[in-house]
């Protein structure tokens, strides 16, 4: 997907999550987000059980190996379908699945360590 506009145009830690959204860089966003090296983007995903490789195609196109994507699947850990996992494997990208809270905390730690990391975070109520 080309033409996507970043909500915030660089990497930044997540300072809060919950109530259906996130806080970062003294801003708030309702809904799910993609945290990429190029910025933070709105992400129109709310149900981890319906997540497909198509929902993360922009991420796969945007990242270069060896980057790991932390997939925050909401309040609980929900494993994605095999096609989504295969898409990351085929692109030589790491995929780590966890709850959104764990993914946001891990993203902040890896970002502070200057590691190659991205996150796809499904908002939690």
Image (tube, helix red, strand yellow):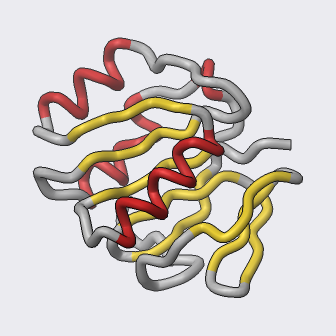
> In percent of the image, x 59 and y 23: which residue is there?
77
Vertical arrangement, residue 13 with respect to residue 77, above or below: below
| Left or right relative to 87: residue 108 | right
Provide residue 43's location: percent of width, then percent of height.
59, 54
Vertical arrangement, residue 121 with respect to residue 76, above or below: below
| Left or right relative to 13: residue 3 | left
Q: Residue furthest top?
A: 82
> In percent of the image, x 64 and y 76: which residue is there?
24
Identify which residue, 119 or 44, lies in the foreground: 119
> In percent of the image, x 54 and y 67: which residue is there?
41
Vertical arrangement, residue 67 with respect to residue 125, above or below: below
Can you say which quadrant of the picture contains the C terminus? top right
Provide residue 111's location: percent of width, then percent of height.
37, 67
Provide residue 25's location: percent of width, then percent of height.
63, 84
Can you say which quadrant of the picture contains the N terminus? bottom left
| Left or right relative to 1: residue 75 | right
Answer with the quarter of the image where residue 115 lies. Answer: bottom left
> In percent of the image, x 46 and y 20: which residue is there?
80
Count of labels shown? 0
Identify which residue, 66 or 90, lies in the foreground: 66
| Left or right relative to 90: residue 74 | right
């Amino acid at each position: 997907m080309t033409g996507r506009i970043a909500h915030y145009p660089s990497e930044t830690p997540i300072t809060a999550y919950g109530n259906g959204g996130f806080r970062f860089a003294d801003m708030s966003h309702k809904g799910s987000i993609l945290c990429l090296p190029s910025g933070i983007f709105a992400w129109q995903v709310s149900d981890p059980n319906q997540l497909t490789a198509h929902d993360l195609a922009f991420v796969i196109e945007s990242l270069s190996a060896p980057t790991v994507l932390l997939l925050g699947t909401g309040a609980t850990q929900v494993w994605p379908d095999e096609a989504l996992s295969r898409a990351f494997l085929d692109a030589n990208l790491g995929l780590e699945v966890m709850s959104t809270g764990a993914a946001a905390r891990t993203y902040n730690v890896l970002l502070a360590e200057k590691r190659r990391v991205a996150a796809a975070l499904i908002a939690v109520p």
